[in-house]
Image (cartoon, rainbow, N blue to C red):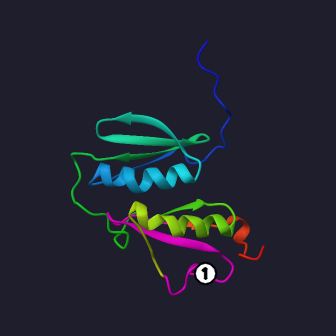
Amino acid sequence: MGPRRRPVTLGALHHVEVWVPDLGAAMHSWGWLLGKLGWTPFQQWPAGHSWRLGPTYLVLEQSPALSGRRHDRLAPGLNHLAFHAGPPAAVDRLVEQAPAYGWELLFPDRHPYAGGADTYAAYLSDGQGYEVELVASDGASPSS
């Protein structure tokens, strides 16, 4: 009898694999952020690392098959990953700490409502061109 598996929702995301040009830099930025968001280390090999949250995992890999040295979020393909980040105060703490880990706040003139008046969120970009959106729970305002 094999390991006991948890039921999953049909169509739910199984994993995301992100190819990065510099695994060390990605570990510094993404490793910090994923840890803060409750993801736990899952797998590790010389060219990659992964983290798990529930049944989903996220992979960062420095593949020798890369065709470029920087991700372009404005080109066809992945623009960003959006994460639930807790209440607005938690989003604010992440934004405050993020520069020390290689993240830069995008759209600072519209922060924290760059996604619209009903969404309290932060948009961050790392030094390799990847963007994340950190969304406050329930689109709540800081006074909630």
Quarter-of-image position of residue 89: bottom right
Q: Residue at x 49, y 82 (%)?
A: 108
Q: Amino acid at mark 1?
A: Tyr
| Disc 1 target residue | 113
> Residue 104 in the image: x percent, y percent?
42, 71
Q: Write the start and end of the magenta stretch as one range.
A: 108-133
Q: Is residue 83 magenta?
A: no
Q: Residue at x 38, y 53 (%)?
A: 28
Rendered position, 41 above or below 25 = above
Q: Residue at x 47, y 53 (%)?
A: 32
Q: Main secondary structure of the magenta part?
A: loop
Q: Nearer the viewer, residue 114 or 66?
A: 114
| Total count of labels | 1
In the image as oriented, which residue stretches furthest toward the top? 1
> Residue 56 in the image: x percent, y percent?
56, 43
Q: Nearer the viewer, residue 69 or 32?
A: 32
**Left or right of 53: which side holds 51?**
left
Rendered position, 82 above or below 1 = below
> Residue 46 in the image: x percent, y percent?
29, 36
Which quadrant: the C terminus?
A: bottom right
